[in-house]
Amino acid sequence: MIKLLETGLVYRNPRPQRRSVHAWHPTLVILADGWLLSACDLTQAAESVDYRTWCSHSSDNRHTWTAPVRIFPTVTTAFSVTAFG
């Protein structure tokens, strides 16, 4: 059984007044060393060309999180853009 102990934010759009960024499909895992790893999809819209998966981690039991980083490297094509980093 999963028991909810506490809630909080892993990602918050740093400039919501400038760009719409939504975090979808959050995933959380506890690593062997006790760190927490979180992954989510950041995008402007459900079918946007900037839809990418990002991850961050916490080494202090969820109190602070690193800035999100892309899981896969940027692929530059005529149909892709880099929107967040």
Image (spheres, helix red, strand yellow):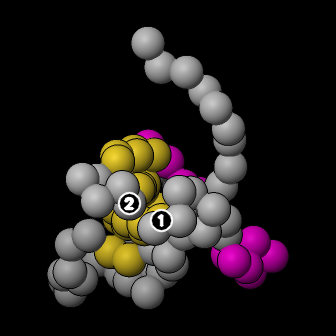
Q: Residue drawn at (36%, 55%), measured in percent from left and top?
A: 34
Q: Which residue is mark 1?
A: 58
Q: Residue drawn at (26%, 70%), measured in percent from left and top?
A: 71
Asked if residue 27 can be seen in this view, the reply is yes
Nearer-the-camera pick, 17 or 62: 62
Q: Quadrant of the C terminus?
A: bottom left
**How much space separates mark 2 and mark 1, taking CA atoms?**
6 Å
Which of the 4 image quarters holds residue 39? bottom left
Crowd around label 1: few <14 · some 14–19 · many ≥20 (10 Å)? some
Asked if residue 43 can be seen in this view, the reply is no
Q: Quadrant of the N terminus?
A: top left
Residue 54 appears left or right of 15: left
Nearer-the-camera pick, 53 or 10: 10
Q: Amino acid at mark 2?
A: Trp
The span shown in magenta is 14-25
Image marks 2 and 1: residues in contact by CB distance under 8 Å: yes
Residue 69 vertical placement versus 44 (above, below): below
Q: Residue drawn at (67%, 69%), measured in percent from left and top?
A: 13
Which of the 4 image quarters holds residue 49? bottom left
Residue 35 appears left or right of 7: left
Q: Where residue 2 appears, x then y in whole percent?
A: 47, 20
Of labels 2 and 1, earlier in sequence is 2
Q: Which residue is mark 2?
A: 35
Q: Residue drawn at (35%, 48%), measured in percent from left and top?
A: 30
The residue positioned farthest toward the top in the image shown: 1
Q: Secondary structure at mark 1?
A: strand
Crowd around label 2: few <14 · some 14–19 · many ≥20 (10 Å)? some
Q: Where residue 27 appears, x then y in whole percent?
A: 39, 45
